[in-house]
Amino acid sequence: MSVSTNDLKNGMTLELDGTLFQVIEFQHVKPGKGGAFVRTKLRNVKTGAVADKTFNAGVKVGLAIVERKEMQYLYADGSDLVFMNLRTYEQVHVPGDIVGEATRYMTEGGQATVALHQGVPISVDLPASMTLAVAQTDPATKGDTRTNALKPATLETGTVVQVPLFVEEGDRVKVDTRSGEYIERVKA
């Protein structure tokens, strides 16, 4: 299947020379003389490397059909993570290197979007924020009321984030999965 470079959109997955690339951004350019062209920024789905590529306007490029499915994380199986399709209950083994940084926030029963190309997992996307329990942190020092003071806290997944002094072990906190930053304490 192919698509014209005039119809590119952010998030599209292209197949170029047997390699999958996701469109991060694109810009149509019409110079004063010469033909129009499309300047793109593409992320290699397998390696994560970002490259700039320029296409002539109207050229056909390969469009990869990628299915995105809501799945539930079940358990780790060696270096793979096992996810279950919430509609069909089918289980999919996703290699740890494809899950990448998302493993820092994955807890059993947590949900993620798994992207599949021809039935093969190519990426795992988490929601923008996740709520996780604080497994270990130092208690707040009595009388320490500095505003914006932070301390390290180890979450149930083993990831360490900086949290305000009032956060205690056992608290649940919302964390931004893109930056790894504390958002707020969640009331039980």
Image: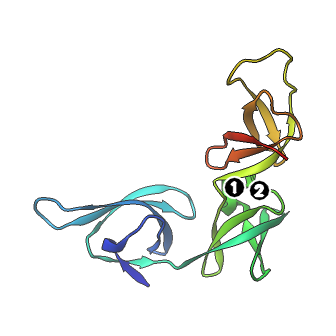
109 in relation to 168, above or below: below
Report the side of 108 relative to 18 (left or right): right
Q: Residue furthest top?
A: 143
User: Residue 72 location in percent, x, y?
Assistant: 77, 68
16 in relation to 88, above or below: above
Residue corresponding to mark 2:
106
User: Residue 162 location in percent, x, y?
Assistant: 72, 33
Asked if the residue under mark 1 is in contact with the one under mark 2, i.e. CB atoms within 8 Å, the reply is: yes
| x 56%, y 59%: residue | 47
What colouring method underlies this structural image?
rainbow
User: Residue 37 location in percent, x, y?
Assistant: 24, 65
Whole-angstrom CA distance, mark 2 to mark 1, is 6 Å
Query: Identity of the amino acid at label 2?
Result: Met
Quadrant occupied by the N terminus: bottom left
| x 61%, y 49%: residue | 178
| x 81%, y 49%: residue | 157
Q: Residue furthest left?
A: 33
Residue corresponding to mark 1:
102
- Between 42 and 178, the one nearer to me in the picture: 178
